[in-house]
Image (tube, rainbow, N blue to C red):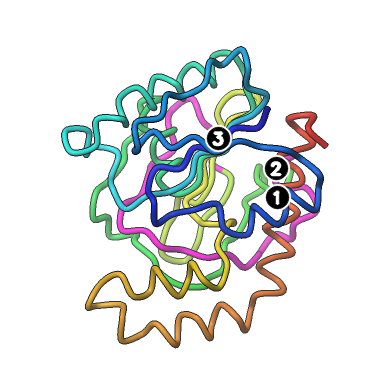
């Protein structure tokens, strides 16, 4: 069973719903922020953890993050294929001893380019994706790769865009799952970004074909690694 963990009601699975339907891969969504229990790992084939407006250190306000971090460590130790997106990637880094910086100078917003390094180009998660690819960024915090991890990608503003730990646990800073509705909604979250909402959406639509191609390929690679496709 593929389990997708949603940390925030305003950060849904987006385009992944369509990609998984195209691939014919069933999945279940776990919402621990709403009090739902995480599934026993013995019933899990692979895990994707989505983003959220909270930070990894906000455990007092969001206590579900504490058992979620333990769940992540168990996934890595048991080699359950794992993909953490934005907050999910930061949680992976934090759970494995990496530094996560709140209100980082490496924050990014919008449709931007990520560049794979040599390890990233050889990594199975990014097979068939060009060295440079278009994706979407919406983060104030950022992670540093844990000492046990391998850096895979960077961007002009953020040196840590993706890493792998162990055989099959990945964290990304970028979002491969957004769609137009998500971009529009997130752009209107704050007084700072709301005046730019139309431009954020127009930029995304202008690069949507390339964005969806890279995102669909990355998810497909993950599903194959997890032997779900």
Q: Which residue is mark 3?
A: 150
Q: Residue at x 80, y 53 (%)?
A: 22
Task: Mark 1 and mark 2 in contact? Answer it, CB < 8 Å.
Answer: yes
Residue at the spot of label 1: 218
| Residue 135 is inside the magenta segment | yes
Labels 3, 2: front one: 2
User: Does residue 30 appear to the left or right of 176 in the view shown?
Assistant: left
Label pair 1/3, CB-CB below 8 angstroms = no
Quick one: SS at disc 2? Answer: helix
Give whichever of discs 3 and 2 has the lower sequence position.
Answer: 2
58 within the magenta span: no
Q: Residues within 10 Å of mark 3 (few under 14, many from 20)?
A: some
Quadrant of image for the N terminus: top right
User: How many other residues sit within 10 Å of disc 2, few (<14), some (14-19) or many (≥20)?
Assistant: many
Residue on which the image places disc 2: 125
Label whose residue precedes the other's in the sequence (1 or 3): 3
């Amino acid at each position: 069973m593929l389990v997708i963990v949603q940390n925030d009601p305003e950060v849904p699975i987006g385009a992944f719903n369509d990609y998984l339907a195209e691939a014919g891969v069933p999945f279940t969504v776990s919402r621990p922020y709403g009090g739902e229990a995480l599934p026993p790992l013995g019933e899990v084939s692979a895990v994707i953890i989505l983003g959220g407006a909270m930070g990894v250190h906000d455990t007092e306000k969001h206590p579900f993050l504490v058992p979620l971090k333990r769940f992540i460590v168990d996934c890595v130790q048991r080699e359950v294929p794992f993909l953490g997106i934005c907050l999910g990637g930061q949680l992976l880094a934090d759970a494995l001893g990496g530094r996560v910086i709140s209100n980082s100078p490496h924050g990014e917003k919008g449709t931007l380019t990520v560049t794979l390094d040599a390890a990233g180009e050889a990594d199975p998660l990014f097979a068939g994706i060009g060295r440079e690819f278009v994706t979407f960024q919406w983060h104030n915090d950022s992670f540093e790769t844990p000492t046990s991890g391998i850096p895979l990608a960077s961007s002009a503003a953020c040196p840590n865009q993706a890493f792998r730990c162990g055989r099959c646990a990945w964290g990304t800073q970028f979002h491969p799952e957004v769609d137009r509705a998500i971009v529009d909604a997130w752009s209107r979250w704050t007084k700072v970004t709301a005046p730019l909402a139309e431009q954020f959406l127009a930029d995304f639509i202008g690069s949507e074909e390339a964005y969806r191609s890279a995102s669909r390929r990355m998810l497909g690679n993950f599903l194959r690694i997890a032997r779900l496709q």
